[in-house]
Structures are given as structure tokens and as C-alpha cells.
Amino acid sequence: MQVLLDIPDQMARKLAASGKDPSRAALEAMAIEAYRSGSLTSGEMRRLLGFETGYELDGFLKSHNIYEGAYGLEDLEKDRRTLQQLEAEGRLRA
């Protein structure tokens, strides 16, 4: 499938000035969002972006500050509830 985007010339020049092909930048942005939302698996993302290996994909993800299995807000909330429960049971000393 081919997707066409209309980008104002001034913005296209800014994107091109960064040294990146605007088409590639748009594809990467779309892939990153789909990956973050769970719409794409890492394997699908690797194929979409044309990476030969998982290591290439890992480098790409890290360069965009995306870390699989990273400690998130849900993890923090779960740990907070656990600490509260341990305190209430007297099994945790402050």
C-alpha cells in the first residue's frame, strides 16, 4: 500500500535538513506508534522497516528511547500497592 502525505514546503525543508528522508521519517514514526500501542510486534516492525536482524531493530528502538520490558507506570502502581499492603500487615519497617 502506498500512502501519500501533503507536507507544507517549509516543514518538508526542515525534515530534509535533518538529513533524513521525509518518507522514511514518516514510516518510522508510524511504526514506532504502532509498536508502542501494541498494533505491531517486534518482528512485524523489523520487517516493515527493512532490518535484517533483531539487533538492528533493538538499536533503532534504543535510539528512539523505546525499551522493551521497561518499568512503567503500571509497575510503579503495583509496587506502591504492595508496599502499602506490607506496611498494613506490619511486615515493612519504615
Image (tube, helix red, strand yellow):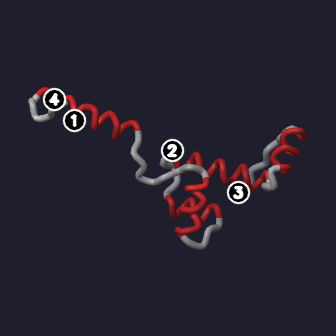
Nearest-to-viewer mark from 3 and 2: 2
* Residue placed most toward the observer, 10 or 70: 70
Name the residue beneath numbered marker 3.
1
Quadrant housing the N terminus: bottom right
Label 1 sits on what residue type?
Answer: Thr
| Residue 74: assigned label | none
Q: Is residue 37 left or right of residue 47?
A: left
Q: Residue furthest bottom?
A: 52
* Residue placed most toward the observer, 38 or 22: 22
Label 4 sits on what residue type?
Answer: Glu
Nearest-to-viewer mark from 4 and 3: 4
Name the residue beneath numbered marker 2.
37
Where is residue 86? Give x, y as percent. 15, 33
Name the residue beneath numbered marker 1.
82
Secondary structure found at label 1: helix
Q: Is residue 38 left or right of residue 1?
A: left
Label 3 sits on what residue type?
Answer: Met
Mark 4 and mark 2 lie on one chain; the one further toward the N terminus is: 2
Q: Residues within 10 Å of mark 2 (few under 14, many from 20)?
A: few
Q: Residues within 10 Å of mark 3 (few under 14, many from 20)?
A: few
